[in-house]
Each structure stands twice: as C-alpha cells, then as structure tokens.
Amino acid sequence: MSTDPLLDRDAVGIAAAFHAGDASAAEIAEAALARIAARNPVLNAFTDVTADRARARAAALDAARARKEALPPLAAAPFAAKNLFDIAGIATRAGSRINRDLPPATTDATLVARMEAAGGLLLGGLNMGEYAYDFTGENAHDGPSRNPHDTTRMTGGSSGGSGGAVAGGLAAVALGSDTNGSIRVPSSFCGTFGLKPTYGRLSRGHSFPFVAALDHVGPLARSVRDLAAGYDAMQGPDAADPGCARRPAEPVGAGFEAGIAGLRIARLGGWFAQHRLAESDAAMDLVCSALGVTTEAALPEAERARGAAFLITMAEAAEFHLPRLRERPGDFDPAVRDRLIAGALLPAAWLMTAQRFRRWFADQVGSVFRDHDVLLAPATPMPAPRLGTQTVTLDGVEMPLRPNIGLYTQPISFIGLPVVAVPVWPAGRGLPIGVQVIAPPWREDLAMRVAHALEREGIARAPVAPFGA
Amino acid sequence: MPDPTPPDPEAIIAALLPATGIPLDPAWRAAVGANLRVAGAIAASLQTFRLPDTVEPAPVFEPGR
C-alpha cells in the first residue's frame, strides 16, 4: 500500500502510524520527498530540500524502533522551516539574493534542532518574502509561493512557503516567523492553524532577524494538537536569543482539550470591526456563534498601535540592513529596498514615541484582559488575493493592498500577545480565512483551548488541498 | 500645542540621506519619498497623542545577558 495518503494526516497522526508500525520512517521520508518532487514545481513552497538529511534521520528512527527504544513524540513527522532559520550546510537566504552569498550555516536554528530532537523529519527550507518584510508570499528572486487551494492566489507572507507546504501536504508542520503578522497571514490565506506565541516564548536563536523588538517564531500546522505538540517540543530558555524569556517551559500537553467552560470570550470591535470584507465578517460570525460569544470589547487606540509597529519596523529593519543598503542596494527586491531606505531616514524621536506608545498600549490592553480571557478578531480583512494584486477597496476606499493585509495582526504582535490563527471556511465560498484567537501574555493555553473547541465543532479545519486545485 | 506637520519627504531625503552612506539611484527617489510620506503621517498621528511623562519606552533589554 502506498505511504502517500499517510501524509494527509497531521503530525501526531503520522507519528502514531510510525509508532504502530504502519509505516517505516524511511517510507514516510521517501513519500514526503516524492510529494515535494511532484508538487513543489507548482507550489514553490520549498527553496531547499534536505533529502539526504531526511533519509539519514529516518534511518536512525527506524533503527531506534527496531531496538525497541522509546520514541520521541513527533517521530517521523515531516516538517520544514522558513528559510530564515539556519539549517546546517545551507546558506540562510532569508528570502534574499544577497544572503545566498553567505557561507553555509554551521549549526541548526534552535527550533529546528528542538523539532528534530522531538522526532521530526526535516525536509528543507521554505520560500518567504525578502527579509520577511512582506505580507504576500511573493518573492522577487525565487518566485511566489502559490496557494494550494488556488494556485493563482497568494499564500500570504512573509512565511508564504510555510503556509503553502502545510496546506499543500508537503510538510505536516512548518516553522515560521511573525513580526507583524507573518505566521497569521499565511495561516489565514492558506487555511492552516498557526501559533504566534508570546513575545520571548520561543527562541529565535540562529535565525536571521528582521525587527528584534517585534520578531516572534512559531509553528503552522493542520491541527491544534500539532500546534501544541510542536510548541511543547520547542519551548524553553535559550542563551542564543537575547529576547528569549528565561521562564521555564510551560507545556500545554493535553490541556488544549479542556474546553471553554468558564472562559470569558469577547469579539473585538472598534478598529477590528472596520475595513472588513464579507468573508472576514462571515468568519467572525461563524466563530462567535459557535462559541456563544455575544460580548464586544475594544482595544483603545489600536490604529495608532498599528502605526507605531509600522514605524518601529521601518526604523529597526533599516538600521539592521544598512551595510547591505550601502553595498548592494541594487540586489534587493525594489519594494523592500525603498521601504528600508525610507526607514533609514526617520527622525529618532519618531521611533522613541512609537516605543513609548508600545508601553502605554500594553498597559491599556492589560486592563481589557481584566474583564476578558480571550479576544477574537479577524486575521486578515480578506481571503487570499490573486497574485500580483496591488490594491484593495476597504470601506469604499481604494488603498494599497500590501500594507493593509496586516491591519488586524499588527496591533496584536506589537505588544507580544499570544495568538492562535484558526482557519474558517465561510459557507458557500471556496477559500479559507483566519480568525485570531488572542490571549493574555504567557497564556497560549487559553488560545489553544478555544481553537480546539472550534476544531472539534468543525468550524475550524485545515485540510490538505487537493493537488491541482 | 501646535500639531506636528508631516514633513516634506524631499526635505528629509536631502538632509539625511548623505549621513547614511546609501547610494540612492534617482529612479528610486519617488518610492522612497512615498514611504516617508506614510511614515510621517503616522508619526504625526502618534505625536498628537500626549503620552503621560511616566510612560517609558518598551525596547528589549535585560541586564546580565
């Protein structure tokens, strides 16, 4: 029997099949590599495939099983990493042309190593927007990653290959990064679950930065139990990331199955109820109806919060890339370069105002969480636009598409709140769209409980797209 | 307090670009200016919102590591 259908299961399901002896790790690895060979020419999710490494890891897992050793929780589950995570032996391109001239990485990113230690089969590196400054999943050098549910559409960025690989069935779990929405946007457009944890929860060690003050990393997956398993496998302090919290791991375990009884859940109004399109409205209605949510809450000055995140992003990223802007400006994606050059010219007071506003906004939102345990908001105003789309009409006003994809994600990551993006399929429409399940700092468990309740009700689901969609 | 006016992007480019050492192709100038215009409008909006003097910035720094 072919091993290929096994790859449509989630990571925990694939690991269970391996544990049960239904398939060897070698068979799973070969099936996954064959799928990449067949589908990646269309989806363009992978930029690097680590076939030899996957085969070697599979052989080691098969040998461990033959010796009846205890097997790790995600044994033989295929995973991959956005190509800003270091993978030993490969230059960390971070979506750029410039970085591929770097020497190959000599070590693995902390999260790659931790996923592999949990049994994962690393398949390779994934396409992304240049230097993560992107919401579309388009890439000027490697070409766009394509949405598996409609290959004429965007995956969303910047972790576009991560969304495409998971929704396309090329990997069960993909690692992404999220500075302003780059896990939640591709989760929304590609119909996957995505976890942007609390700022500092998961280590960014040995990954290529974008904006140190705002960078988060986390998993995309096809089930909440996969998010939980991956999250638990990757937690813990790490000296390689100065922003990684020193608090010990707080495993969710099976806690995501605890249900939502007693949780005070509210729908965000104000900024998060403006600019929506029919699809995001319908998704929010579905989710709120399923959860019995009738309360509305507001985050004060969310629009200014988004603006402050925008300025911090411009200024920090520009400073970080200054040497490359001086030496090789013509080798950038022009859209990224022009934003970075502008960022290099911002008066310092603008940045400091934004950083002070961040503190104020975090305090205000802390007050909101005194009355609510979980907040709900759309992940994106719209489902995946067609590749190349430049403008969108929101509330009757035509505006540039790219920056406005992140309208609802930016104020949340700005203050580091944990979010699970859940994929919803509004009735009668073929494309998914995400809803953000937002929890107070360090309470990823609450967001996962709500996400799992929606998954159990069939409201949130992340099927593998039929190939050729 | 008078509201800060978003500055002229051309004036910012002319004043500050030489200090960055970035070689700016004239063909890129309009797009850089457009980005500065957006940033300037955001900054003006933030600076019209009076923060209490007690509010400190929120960068990331932890002594001892």
Image (cartoon, rainbow, N blue to C red):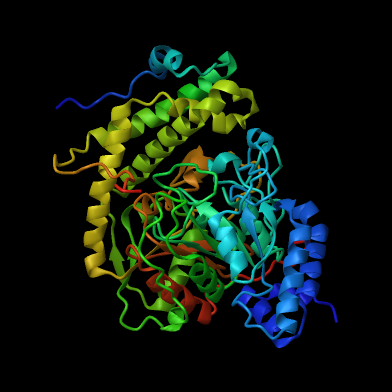
Q: Position of residue A161 (x, y in %)?
A: 65, 53
Tell me what residue is drawn at x 80 percent, y 69 percent.
A31
Which residue occupies the extreme right position in the image?
A1
Measuring 27% from the left and 69% from the top, which residue is drawn there? A372
Is residue A428 at all visible to an observer of this figure? no
Camera-side residue: A415 or A58?
A58
What percent of the width, then of the height, locates residue A102? 65, 36
Q: Is residue A272 visible?
A: yes
Residue A378 drawn at (x, y percent) = 44, 59
Residue at 45% across / 51% down in the picture? A241
Q: Position of residue A21 (x, y in %)?
A: 74, 86
In the figure, is residue A77 to the left or right of A440?
right
Query: Between residues A198 and A439, which one lies in front from this camera angle?
Result: A198
Q: Quadrant of the C terminus of chain A?
A: bottom right
The quadrant holding residue A311 is top left
Count numbered badges in the picture: 0
Answer with left or right where residue B14 lies relative to residue A358. right
Above or below, A98 relative to A282: above
In-image side of B20 versus A297 (left or right) = right
